[in-house]
């Protein structure tokens, strides 16, 4: 009996580490029809990104990629010295040569186990609005991060060219992505795939809260509701776990650095199976339970025999 086609997800492969490259080399589908969602940070160097996506696209029926901040870096030792928007567009061209779906392509519809659902890879960056609570401006938040010695390497290697700043690039990406999402088929639930969490709450568990400002934007805080998400897939935090926000399942699917995944065991296993139909049923059940509790709270405890008002 053949296994059902599954929708799988992973992120933050960081194959510059030999142990992580070995993990990717051994990563195979359970079924020829499986899809793989890759939520960014495959690698920093162009050649490594190409190697990993070419390998995965040769094994999985379809690979869907959303860029992370590491793919957008311009490391000084990378022969491909493109910056900012130009680097991103070159990565999109690479993916298209390999048959990998990007945020610039039509959103595919998953019709295997748990489908149908629209798979929407996103690229929205961040704009420093997840700043530390005691800071009222971006500059104050950055100053506190520098004082604490917690500064993302993006400040040196992620260039926003031709945009005047990373937050300006983020604003442009948010506007374009909202337009694309609004044009999707509203009859289908979505699986939103983004490198960063769409809401701030997952960053509350960061060991260094100053790092949250490089983890997303408040502009996306209601996208899981506005755009019919059954599931949100993300990475970046290197804290693989499942959380629920407004009843919607959020899956953090990072592999992360070897020093991190070794704490969880000798063999990394971050790949998750995404089942939109189950997540949609669970979400509706949670909301129905919440509505029932709200109605009970509004009417007071039921008594027997019921009063005329309770019967109504």
Image: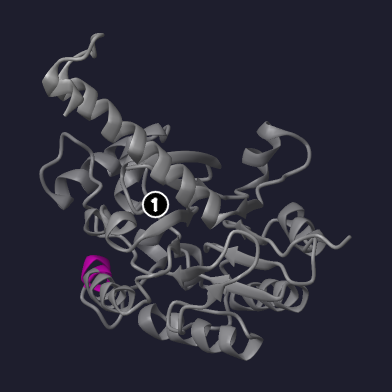
* Quarter of the rendering containing residue 25: bottom right
Q: Residue at x 28, y 75 (%)?
A: 182
In the rendered view, would you say 100 is above or below 178? below
**What residue occupies the far right of the structure in this picture?**
1
In the rendered view, would you say 155 is above or below 254? below
Judge whether residue 14 can be spotted in this image: no
Q: Nearer the viewer, residue 222 or 80?
A: 222
Residue 77: x percent and y percent? 57, 73
In the visual, does 249 lie left or right of 224?
right
In the rendered view, would you say 81 is above or below 277? below
Which secondary structure type mostly characterizes the magenta part of the structure?
Answer: helix
Q: Residue at x 21, y 52 (%)?
A: 129
Residue 96: x percent and y percent? 57, 88
In the visual, does 211 lie left or right of 12?
left
In the rendered view, would you say 36 is above or below 210? below
Q: Is residue 307 magenta?
A: no
| Residues rendered magenta in the picture | 165-170
**What residue occupies the far top of the structure in this picture?**
304
Judge whether residue 228 can be spotted in this image: yes
Which quadrant of the rendered structure holds the C terminus?
A: top left
Quick one: SS at disc 1? loop
* Quarter of the rendering containing residue 288: top left
Q: Residue at x 65, y 78 (%)?
A: 50
In the visual, does 165 lie left or right of 262?
left
For label 1, the residue is 197
In the visual, does 263 lie left or right of 142?
right
Which quadrant of the rendered structure holds the N terminus?
A: bottom right
Model colouring: one colour
Q: Residue at x 67, y 33 (%)?
A: 264
Q: Is residue 166 magenta?
A: yes
């Amino acid at each position: 009996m053949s296994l059902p086609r599954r929708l799988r997800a992973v992120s933050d492969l960081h194959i510059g580490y030999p142990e992580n490259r070995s993990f990717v080399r051994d990563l195979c589908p359970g079924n020829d029809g499986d899809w793989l969602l890759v939520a960014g940070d495959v690698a920093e160097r162009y050649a490594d990104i190409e190697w990993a996506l070419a390998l995965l696209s040769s094994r999985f029926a379809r690979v869907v990629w959303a860029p992370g901040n590491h793919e957008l870096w311009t490391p000084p030792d990378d022969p491909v010295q493109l910056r900012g928007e130009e680097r991103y567009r070159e990565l999109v061209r690479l993916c298209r040569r390999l048959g990998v779906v990007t945020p610039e392509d039509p959103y595919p519809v998953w019709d295997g186990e748990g489908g149908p659902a629209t798979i929407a890879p996103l690229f929205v960056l961040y704009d420093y609005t997840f700043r530390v609570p005691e800071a009222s401006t971006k500059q104050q938040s950055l100053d506190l991060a520098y004082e604490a010695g917690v500064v993302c390497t993006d400040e040196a290697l992620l260039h926003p060219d031709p945009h005047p700043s990373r937050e300006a690039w983020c604003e442009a990406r948010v506007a374009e992505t909202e337009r694309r999402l609004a044009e999707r088929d509203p009859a289908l639930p979505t699986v939103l795939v983004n490198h960063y969490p769409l809401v701030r709450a997952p960053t509350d568990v960061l060991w260094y809260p100053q790092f949250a400002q490089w983890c997303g934007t408040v502009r996306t805080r209601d996208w899981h509701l506005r755009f019919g998400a059954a599931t949100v897939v993300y990475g970046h935090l290197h804290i693989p776990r499942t959380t629920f926000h407004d009843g919607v399942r959020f899956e953090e699917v990072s592999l992360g650095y070897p020093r991190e995944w070794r704490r969880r065991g000798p063999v990394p296993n971050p790949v998750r199976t995404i089942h939109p139909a189950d997540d949609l049923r669970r979400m509706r059940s949670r909301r129905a339970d919440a509505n029932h509790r709200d109605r009970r709270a509004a009417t007071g405890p039921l008594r027997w025999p019921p009063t005329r008002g309770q019967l109504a």
